[in-house]
Amino acid sequence: MAPSGVTDVATPAEFSVSAVSWGPIIAGAFVASTLTLILTLVGSGLGLTMVSPWSGDNPSATTFAVSTAIWLVIVQWLSSGLGGYLTGRLRTKWVGIHTDETFFRDTAHGFLAWALATLVVVLVLGSALSSTVGTGVQAISTVASGAAMGASVGATANTENGGTDGTTSYFVDALFRPTDPGRLAASAEGDAAAAAQASRILVASAVAGELPADDKAYLAQLVAARTGLSAPDASARVDAVLARVEQARAAAKEAADAARRAGATFSLVGALSLIIGAFIASAAGALGGSQRDDEEALFVSGQM
């Protein structure tokens, strides 16, 4: 019994049950991750229909990246919404909890379901995403090197074999194309050494961005000696080929910049889609929990 003049203050007891209902969270996450996989496959199919084996019919890299990013937003919207809603509807009723606390818990449960679903998708598609990113980086590197740059890594091996395999072979062939086709067989062996030298000159000029005057003069002499052209005509042919090399180099640089911009756009919109998914899952969890409590209240009142 409390002493006279002292008021008993009841100490509120803590609930022994955790506020987190992992069962509904796991169920909602599995549903969300499964729907994400399905929609990702659908998006892949739609994306493949945009790609044509004829290069002129393909959309630009920016268009493809933006359309893919928009589809990611749609995927997050649908999968996160369904997963969060099911999480809220499947949890048990919390008795003796204030309405604001119930709203917070439902929101948190929807967010946890989205986070778990995101981890599941990353674990399932992790290797595929890594392979895709690696392929994209390799493709961008190949484009950046360009037709004008050639295969600089294999340039030494190519010249040792007396050939000009790769993208520089076309330009070298253009340099040593005889004016008289009858000279082709007679000059075939000599063309191998000349082509090797021309290949090294073209690779070096493409990397440096310019061709020194002495290299250009020597290249014109090689062309004149192997094709039978006059010195002015050989020099004109060298200028024409170098102009085409520069055009190819500029086009490769522009393509690499476009790929970089498309990759940046895809990353930013992809991050935005995840933020949207988290918000939608949280709101759907609150909505599902509210409807679950309302339906139970109507059922109980109808039985009374």
Image (cartoon, grey):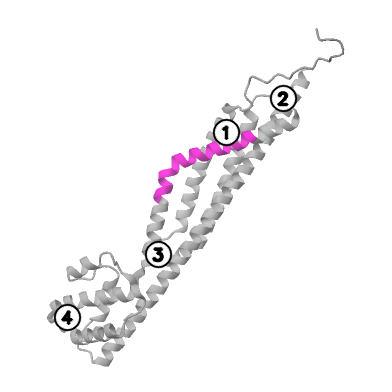
Q: Earlier in the sequence, mark 4 or mark 3?
A: 3
**Other-residue count near label 4 (Cα within 10 Å), few / some / many at <14 / 14–19 / ≥20:** some
Q: Residue at 58% across / 35% down in the picture?
A: 113
Q: Determine which quarter of the picture holds residue 32.
A: top right
Q: Which residues are magenta?
A: 108-131
The spot of residue 176 in percent (x, y) is 23, 81
Amino acid type, residue under disc 2 in the picture: Glu
Q: Earlier in the sequence, mark 4 or mark 2?
A: 4
Do labels 3 and 1 touch, CB within 8 Å?
no
The residue tagged 3 is 54
Local secondary structure at mark 1: helix
Which quadrant: the C terminus? top right
Q: Magenta: predominant secondary structure element? A: helix
> Distance of mark 1 from mark 2, alpha carbons?
20 Å
The residue tagged 2 is 296
Q: Earlier in the sequence, mark 2 or mark 3?
A: 3
Residue 242 numbered mark, or none: none
**Residue nearest the viewer, comparing 141 with 40:** 141
Residue 184 numbered mark, or none: 4
291 above or below 206?
A: above
Viewer can see residue 240: yes
